[in-house]
Amino acid sequence: MKTLDSHHNCSITKLSDESLKFAYENAKAENLDGDFIQLLETELLKRKEGCLY
């Protein structure tokens, strides 16, 4: 499995929560590249975990 370096998703981190969720849902619906979906999912999980503290 490839590692996901943080510099690869720097523009993803700039998305609003709503835009990130929209991008993730549409990427899955359109069956886009699995690595791209993984990047979006990782960012979603980071934000979700960040809200718990």
Image (cartoon, rainbow, N blue to C red):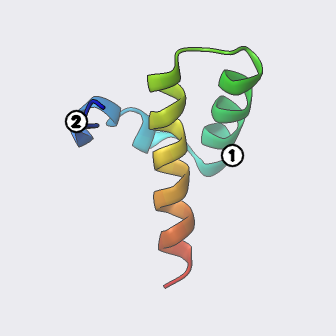
Residue in the image at 64% along x and 34% along y: 24
Residue 25 % position (x, y): 73, 33
> Within the image, what quadrant is residue 5 found in?
top left
Give the amino acid at mark 2.
His
Residue 3 left/right relative to 28: left
Where 47 falls versus 12 (above or below)?
A: below
* Horizontal and vertical percent position of residue 31: 68, 15
Density class for disc 1 (Cα within 10 Å; few <14, some 14-19, many ≥20) is few
**Residue closest to the far bottom:** 53
- Mark 2 falls on what kind of element? helix
Circle nearer the viewer, 1 or 2: 2
Q: Residue at x 22, y 35 (%)?
A: 7
Where's residue 8, x and y in %?
28, 30
Q: Amino acid at mark 1?
A: Glu
Q: Residue at x 55, y 81 (%)?
A: 52
Horizontal side of 7 relative to 49 (left or right) equals left
Distance Cα–Cα, label 1 vs label 2: 22 Å
Residue lying at the far right in this picture: please name it: 29
Q: Tell me if 9 is positioned left or right of 22 in this view.
A: left
User: Disc 1 designates what residue?
Assistant: 18
Which quarter of the figure is the N terminus placed in?
top left
Q: Nearer the viewer, residue 22 or 32?
A: 32
For this orientation, the residue located farthest to the front is 1
The residue at which mark 2 appears reads as 7
Query: N-terminal of the two: label 1 or label 2?
Result: 2
Classed neighbour count for the residue bearing mark 2: other residues with Cα under 10 Å, few (<14), some (14–19), many (≥20): few
- Residue 35 in the image: state x and y as whole percent: 44, 24
Tag count in the figure?
2
- Of residue 11 and residue 25, the one placed in the foreground of this image is 25
Secondary structure state at the residue bearing disc 1 = helix
